[in-house]
Image (cartoon, grey):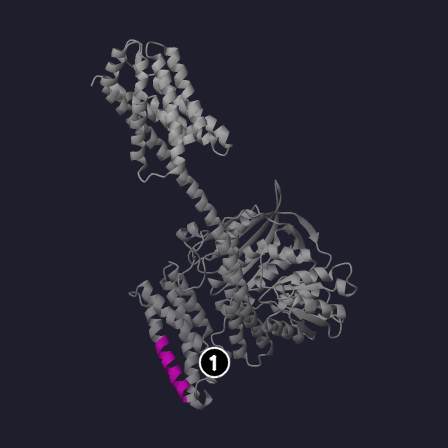
């Protein structure tokens, strides 16, 4: 028992030896097997020698320790070379210590190394179901094999005494040492396996992310095909609409399709930026055109809501700036989408200023609206993905501002937002840039309605698409403006048609059977293609919309790029850039009217006339009587001091639809404004109630006037 406590302490030193092995094992990863075996042998030999620095001396010249454990495991861990190298340090140290037991100690290390090599050989050919039990049995057998080395002691009596007295202790020490040292190394090896597994999982996750991104890109392509038809025919119906109510319905159809398209673009863009380090691709571009293109997506929606979408600042007309144009436009589109969505009356204004900074010029783009605004809690999370800044009653995917933040960071800029409930929102982008002065060809002022005219009589356009409905939409839009069209279903047919001659431009889809659009374009641009086929303008018309797709089209020799679903004005602008059309300000272009709710008419005869076509006179008279009664009751509820904010909001919500359906635009717009401010957290106070009351009074008077005319007049 006197030896047991120091023996346990000695075995405990194996934990430190295991740390030495683990550190060395980490350094040896990734190198050739022989070098690795040498390094592991040196580490295990050092661990064995480390244990010998704290020996137990039980007789003069005779010491006892746990040096055998690392040697017994050396061959198992690294093979014969490791076992041989591991035995050298403890053998040398035992010979240096000397004493009557030195020869026995040295020979014992040789025996343990041989046992370790045999164990390695066995384990190469067999797997043990219970490795720890097998390890303990191996330690006991190796110790028993090593006991005869005691016969090298000076006398047989001494050898027998040591074997009988300390044999059991030696068996315990070796078994416990091998178990402890083996367990520690097993834990370390398991940790390494887990780390390796995690790395493999990370790699698999990255691959899965790429697969998901490809899937989203594919779905984007597929969804855009029906959207192309929806948006295209909506624009055609809008052009031919003879009844104002039909025109409004078509406008709303177009707005809905564009909203869906923006959501798809947001999802696609979010998948592209997630986990990918992007770089800005800067090039000179027209700042007014960039702003105009972004605002163009929302003019119809803004007009339907009665808000003024405008640009402030006269100093940027026709300015050329060096920025990542597509990325900046995407940011501006997402900001405008929120501004228009959450503004029910007033305006959404875009301003652009070039400022001088220490590092160069800075483009400051500001979007200001008179919408519902946000509180500090919303502002704190506005840039988080899938955080919706409005209420659940307003659609949105929660990606817009996250995309803005990521895009601005890529461009090396900053984005700032100021807002308060009921006070609107201002979003400011500051982007490093370089200005180049005005363009050679003056651009139209932002927001100016455009007229497109042909540069020649009936230019012929070849529309290439394997999906018939896409071709039909494009041809209809082209024929509307006076172009003649022809179609092809693949790149090979398109090449043949262009070589035959007679076309002024080509709209080329990318993904088609037989031959895709990129290959067809490359072949048409080849030196062996005769003129004028070789230089004919080719505009990509595709549902693939990433920056890489755009670059691939331009690299193939295309002159421009249009994303499906095709927008009529974007199509005409693209044709104007290649000389097929020319663009100028519309003859009847006039400044936008004041569309603020205070400037809205009390009553819209046009809206009311649409209602009279749907409802017979007697029924309509009853509808007007009921509307007057409900407006009176709801107006009282809005002004009732004892009513809580939710009751007032519900009353205002009902007024929005009741008044709007019969043409009481000012009452509908004002009610919508205040129900949104209540929803955003701004209290509806007595002053607001008085404002609503001042609008209800003339609204009821108008209803009384309509009722007095009788069913026949109504």
Which one is in front, 230 or 337? 230
Dividing the picture into quadrants, the one containing residue 448 is: bottom right
Specify whether residue 240 is in view.
yes
Residue at 63 percent of width and 67 percent of height:
569
x, y percent for residue 628: 38, 79
Q: Position of residue 392 (x, y in %)?
A: 39, 62
Residue 2 higher or lower than 37, as above or below: above
Q: Is residue 281 above or below residue 142?
A: below
Instruction: Name the spot of residue 576 as percent of width and height, x first.
Output: 70, 65
- State which quarter of the image contains the C terminus: bottom left
Q: Is residue 628 magenta?
A: yes
Q: Percent from the top left, x then y, of residue 679?
A: 38, 61
Q: Residue at left 23%, top 18%?
A: 164
Q: Is residue 594 above or below residue 160?
A: below
Residue 82's place in the image compared with 227, above or below, is above
Residue 633 figure quarter: bottom left
Magenta span has 242? Answer: no
Q: Nearer the viewer, residue 533 or 673?
A: 533
Q: Give the residue pinned by disc 1.
A: 608
Residue 584 as seen in the image, left or right of residue 210 = right
- Residue stretch rendered in magenta on the structure: 618-631
Tell which of 48 and 512 is nearer to you: 48
Task: Give the quadrant of the N terminus.
Answer: top left
Residue placed farthest to the right in the image?
A: 531
> Farthest left residue?
1
């Amino acid at each position: 028992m006197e030896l047991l406590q120091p023996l346990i302490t000695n075995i405990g030193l194996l934990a430190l030896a295991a740390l030495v092995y683990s550190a060395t094992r980490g350094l040896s990863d990734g190198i050739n097997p022989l070098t690795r075996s040498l390094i592991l042998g040196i580490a295990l030999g050092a661990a064995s020698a480390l244990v010998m620095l704290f020996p137990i001396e039980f007789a003069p010249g005779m010491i006892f320790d746990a040096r055998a454990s690392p040697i017994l495991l050396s061959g198992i861990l690294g093979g014969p070379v490791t076992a041989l190298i591991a035995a050298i340090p403890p053998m040398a140290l035992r010979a240096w210590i000397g004493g009557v037991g030195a020869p026995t100690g040295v020979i014992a290390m040789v025996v343990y190394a041989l046992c370790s090599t045999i164990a390695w050989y066995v384990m190469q050919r067999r797997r043990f179901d219970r490795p720890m039990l097998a390890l303990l049995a191996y330690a006991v057998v190796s110790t028993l094999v090593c006991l005869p080395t005691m016969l090298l002691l000076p006398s047989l009596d001494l050898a027998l005494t040591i074997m009988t007295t300390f044999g059991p202790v030696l068996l315990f020490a070796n078994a416990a040492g091998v178990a402890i040292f083996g367990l520690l190394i097993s834990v370390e090896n398991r940790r390494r396996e887990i780390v390796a597994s995690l790395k493999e999982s990370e790699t698999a996750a990255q691959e899965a992310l790429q697969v998901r991104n490809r899937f989203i890109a594919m779905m984007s392509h597929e969804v855009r095909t029906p959207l192309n038809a929806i948006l295209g025919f909506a624009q055609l119906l809008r052009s031919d609409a003879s009844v104002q109510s039909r025109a409004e319905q078509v406008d709303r159809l177009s707005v809905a399709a564009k909203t869906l398209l923006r959501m798809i673009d947001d999802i696609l863009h979010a998948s592209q930026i997630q986990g990918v380090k992007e770089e800005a691709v800067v090039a000179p571009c027209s700042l007014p055109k960039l702003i105009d293109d972004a605002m163009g997506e929302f003019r119809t929606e803004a007009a339907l809501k009665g808000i003024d979408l405008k640009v402030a600042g006269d100093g940027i007309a026709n300015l050329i700036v060096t920025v990542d144009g597509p990325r900046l436009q995407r940011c501006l589109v997402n900001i405008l989408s929120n501004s228009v969505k959450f503004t029910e009356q007033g305006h959404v204004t875009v301003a652009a200023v070039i400022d001088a900074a220490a590092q160069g010029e800075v483009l400051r783009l500001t979007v200001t609206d008179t919408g519902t605004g946000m509180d500090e809690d919303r502002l704190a999370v506005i840039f988080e993905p899938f955080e919706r800044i409005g209420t659940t009653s307003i659609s949105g995917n929660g990606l817009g501002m996250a995309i803005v933040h990521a895009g601005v960071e890529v461009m090396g800029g900053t984005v700032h937002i100021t807002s308060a409930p009921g006070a609107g929102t201002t979003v400011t982008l500051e982007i490093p840039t370089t200005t180049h002065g005005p363009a050679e060809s003056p651009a139209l002022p932002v927001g100016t309605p455009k007229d497109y005219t042909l540069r020649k009589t009936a230019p012929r356009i070849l529309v290439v698409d394997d999906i018939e409905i896409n071709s039909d939409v494009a041809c209809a839009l082209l024929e509307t403006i006076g172009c003649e069209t022809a179609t092809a279903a693949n790149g090979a047919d398109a090449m043949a048609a262009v070589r035959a001659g007679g076309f002024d431009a080509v709209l080329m889809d990318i993904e088609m059977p037989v031959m895709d659009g990129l290959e067809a374009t490359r072949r048409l641009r080849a030196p062996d293609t005769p003129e004028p086929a070789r230089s004919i303008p080719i505009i990509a018309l595709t549902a693939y919309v990433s920056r890489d797709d755009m670059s691939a089209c331009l690299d193939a020799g295309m002159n421009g790029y249009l994303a499906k679903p095709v927008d009529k004005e974007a199509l005409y602008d693209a044709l104007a850039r290649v000389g097929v059309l020319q663009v100028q300000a519309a003859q009847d272009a006039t400044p936008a009217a004041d569309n603020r709710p205070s400037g809205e008419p009390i009553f819209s005869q046009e809206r009311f006339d649409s209602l009279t076509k749907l409802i017979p006179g007697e029924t309509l008279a009853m509808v007007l009587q009921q509307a007057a009664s409900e407006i009176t009751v709801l107006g009282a509820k809005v002004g009732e001091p004892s009513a809580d904010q939710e009751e007032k909001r519900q009353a205002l919500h009902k007024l929005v639809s009741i008044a709007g359906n019969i043409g009481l635009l000012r009452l509908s717009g004002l009610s919508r404004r205040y129900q949104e401010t209540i929803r955003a957290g701004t209290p509806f106070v007595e002053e607001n109630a008085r404002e609503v009351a001042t609008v209800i009074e003339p609204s009821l008077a108008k209803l009384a006037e309509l009722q007095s005319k009788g069913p026949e007049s109504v």
